[in-house]
Amino acid sequence: MAFVKKQQQQRCRERFSLLMLDLEEYYFDHHTFYYVLTNNKGERRSIKGSLKICSKSLIFEPDQISEPILKFPFRECSRIEEIEDKKSNNPFEENRICGFCITCCQICLIKEERLVAPYKIERGPKDYVFRIEDIAKAEDVVQSLLQLHRASQLDKMADQIAMITAILQSRLARTSFDKNRFQSVTERPHMECEAEMVTPLVSNPGHVCITNQNLYFQPLNGYPETVVQVKLHEIRRIYKRRHGLKPLGLEVFCTEDDLCSDIYLKFYNSKDRDELYYYIATFLENHITEHTAESYMLQWQRGYLSNYQYLLHLNNLADRSCNDLSQYPIFPWIIADYTSSELDLSNPEIFRDLRKPVGALNQERLDRLLARYREMPDPKFMYGSHYSSPGYVLFYLVRVAPEYMLCLQNGKFDNADRMFNSFAETWRNCLEGATDFKELIPEFYGTNSSFIVNSLKLDLGKRQGGKMVDSVELPPWASGPDDFLQKNRDALESQYVSEHLHEWIDLIFGYKQKGSEAIAAYNVFHPLTYEGGVDWGSIEDPNQKIAMLTQILEFGQTPKQLFTSPHPQRIMPKFQSLSRGCSRSTSITELPPDSTLKMFSKEKKLLQRSMSFSNMALSSCLLLEGTTVLCSSWDNNVYFYSVAYGRRQDTLMGHDDAVSKICWYKDHLYTSSWDSTVKVWRCASADLSSSRKNSCELMAELEHDAGVNTISLNPIGTMLVSGNKEGTVSIWDLTTLTVLHQIHCHLGAINDVAFSPDSHHVLSAGEDCCLKVIDVQTGMLISSLPTDQQQRCFCWDGNTVLSGSQSGELLVWDLMAAKITERILAHSGAVTCIWMNEQCSNIITGGEDKQIIFWKLQY
């Protein structure tokens, strides 16, 4: 719910929000005014505040938060008249305009005492008087109001829109991007153009400028910030977007897997959009890899992407965006059982049939719909509503996005009985309702359960029977909101869904989306919902065009088609029993990524236990006091396994991308991730050894410029060293949680890092086939040892290093002499990990040949 978080941050600063505007309305500028009230005795009182001039309304935000915000729709105004200042006694000086009087038949009162609630409406003609603080600006303000009022009184909607568009373009033409906003004097501008920044339900016009270093957007109204900046070197993904069914959108992401982008821009012509896109794409050419639906499909098939991650990527490629509620990301209903007390994910009966769209899950209802379909004239459609629309998105999110719902529904919440009250009730209505065929949104499989809970204490109305609408009623098998989401995530990543998800993808993004295959799959929606379903060039009447566009945006849109042939099934690993190894090694025969935790007996040379946590690879593990095993995974989680009880004890949903490494020291867990962070958690050992869940508390987050591949602690736990994907080593002081040194010392990703036993030095190994030694006190690079191949991992005692190479050799290094003293052939594939005991007498290595080898040093 990233877009909701942005709104909440804005809510902390001021009461006014662009969501108070009507849909397709613009906010132009603001001025300090005094709202003048006169009581029955003729006594006057002035309320100071900010008057917002918008394209369809006038909004007054009082400085006093106890006073409501007033919204005056221009269409409800019968008169706007200037007020002159008659205080001057000089007969040769003309009276100056100091404000205006407005006669309005209906106004809205919003956010009284800062409470988010349905708008109060005051009806009946009434005069309202406003005086401006800066009299020099009064005449221009009044003329703007009169011009916008004239536009609102035009008979045809198309004429109103044309006049407002002309006013907007005139304002944009009189301004330009302020180059004093550049972050550096060395910046060189490449292009500047006019555009709008898009957020859910809102478009904010302004100026775009791109330089050799930054992408800028400067809102015409200076709201909510004077300028928005995105650093080009931080951009990871860019997408061209359809906006309002036109190829005018561009969305920019500075993260790999985030749900919401950093900026979404809508241009006034495709030429400007394309020029900006290709400039950024050229800049990124050497920094990122462009991904296609096919490349993501292959990663998913092989288990490198979770089901959740894959669906997010497909939504992005299919023009779905969190900034466009008419094209919000779509996720499937997975669980079909909301009444049982227990949820058994090994039972196929509890899952929804992913071969069918929601409208075809109930045969009795489908028969009625098909009967109507057969009698319908062309163009035929089976379903009169869509599986995704702005109304459906906000139906689910109203508890965390109430202002969006009020914006969409003209200041009102929906009828209490039609609200999102219960999971069981909502699922039942999707099965039985005559017009309800909605799917889910990503939040159902996320980690933030706030959209289920009425934590804002909103008054959402009273249902028939007198019960107030509050938090969503959970199914019996969920112990709470967080548990509900956890079980949803488990269901999404389950074996059953992994084996059948491709069938749902065929319906939504694939070959069953359109044509004869869609008809055969009972997957036919209104033709206006499909890309290319309307020939805009053939519609000459502007009013008809506006009405059709409004219908399309409110009704919902089908995603862009990504696949035209059947989507392949996911490759599911077939787990086999472990074979006995020889006296010095144990063989593992599964296909990577294995995603299982295995425990071996060193004495018996046999597998003792095997535990599968997810469909993604495990990246590292720790054994705490012989009672608890911690495993990190590419699925973004850390898993806690109880040795005593032989089961998974807890799950820490720690990151937004794969967890690459974990470390432990005195009740503190350190996790690194490809999401460019290292997180510090407090996890009491006593809690971990018990059956208590959610025992880890996030203490700090250490930000990096790129994905973190590896971390290590010094022996006394006061410092941490990290190595990232771009070759930078960072040394952190854990007592102050600050970075001591950042050293870019490798060309390519860093494979492993570690402190020397005395904490005076750091050793790193990278993709550039070098070992580097860094002085901790000064941050200076003091030694570089080149090799003929990558060293993937190592252990060292401060002088002698034992490293594991890409070819499978173990190399013994004398750091003082800067040379290799011994080569040992260990594995037939790369050595991927090394462990050494404190006495430096026993070593264990693991390799890509699926061998675990135990070594004893000979002196």
Image (tube, helix red, strand yellow):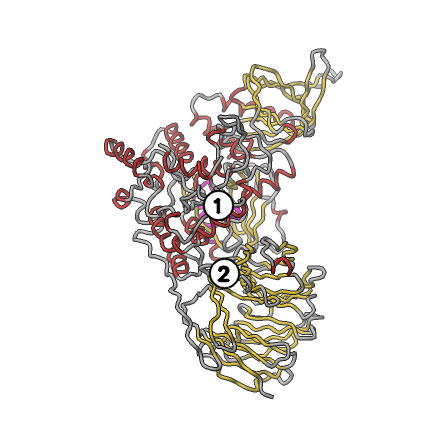
Do tag 1 and tag 2 residues touch (Cβ < 8 Å)?
A: no
The image quarter in which residue 21 lies: top right
Q: Position of residue 556 (x, y in %)?
A: 40, 37
Of the numbered discs 1 and 2, the one sitting upstream in the chain is: 1
Q: Secondary structure at mark 2?
A: loop
Q: Residue furthest bottom?
A: 859
Circle number at residue 477: 1
Q: Nearer the viewer, residue 459 or 539?
A: 459
Is residue 760 depicted above or below 46 in this figure?
below
Give the quarter of the figure containing the C terminus: bottom right
Label 1 and label 2: CA atoms lie apart by 28 Å
Q: Which residue corresponds to the image point at 61% horizontal and 56% vertical from the top-left?
A: 186
Q: Residues within 10 Å of mark 1 (few under 14, many from 20)?
A: some
Q: Which residue corresponds to the image point at 42% horizontal and 34% vertical from the top-left?
A: 554
Question: In the figure, is residue 113 to the left or right of 656?
Answer: right
Circle number at residue 634: 2
Q: Residue furthest top?
A: 41
Magenta-drawn segment: 260-278
Numbered disc in front, either 1 or 2: 1
Q: Nearer the viewer, residue 49 or 599?
A: 599
Q: Nearer the viewer, residue 593 or 646?
A: 646
Q: Is residue 545 magenta?
A: no
Q: Position of residue 636 (x, y in %)?
A: 52, 57
